[in-house]
Image (cartoon, rainbow, N blue to C red):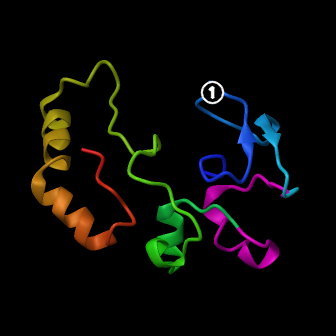
Amino acid sequence: MFAANGIIELKTSKSDYTVEDITKNEKKLEFIAVEGAVLVRSLDDVDASAINTNYALEGGFQPLKDALIIEGKDSPYVNILVARPDNKEDESIQKLAKALTTPDVKQFIEEKYEGAVVPAF
């Protein structure tokens, strides 16, 4: 997100980055790794924070209104349903997968989260 918005530059051809992958940081920003669940509570101790949408919502933020920058619909970070290889074809797993991707669920997500959470199906 920071690189996509021109704030830093990163090594190319990776899918998972750490602070060691920053190749350009002209603003001399200090990045501190913090467990996602405590990001909202740590805001008083930092100037800014990159907070996962679910934690921002739990912390009372409205991501589309409160965020300085926000990932777009093309973000590679989506929640996915997975199953063990031995039960991925189980009827109950298949029913759950089908239920989670219905138009009703999509509408619920869009209305409940007002665009802060984007259905990826």
Residue at 49% in and 63% down:
53
Q: Position of residue 66 (x, y in %)?
A: 53, 78
Judged from the image, the secondary structure of the residue bearing numbered disc 1 is loop
Q: Give the range drawn in magenta.
A: 29-48
Q: In which quarter of the image is residue 111?
A: bottom left
Residue at 32% in and 30% down:
83
Q: Does the magenta stretch include residue 71?
A: no
Which corner quadrant holds the C terminus?
A: top left
Q: Does the magenta stretch include residue 35?
A: yes
Q: Mark 1 points at which residue?
A: 14
Residue at 72% in and 30% down:
11
Residue at 12% in and 31% down:
91
Residue situated in front as seen by the camera: 105 or 94: 105
Q: Position of residue 22 (x, y in %)?
A: 78, 40
Q: Please state which amino acid type lies under the numbered disc 1.
A: Lys
Residue 114 vertical position relative to residue 89 in the rendered view, above or below: below
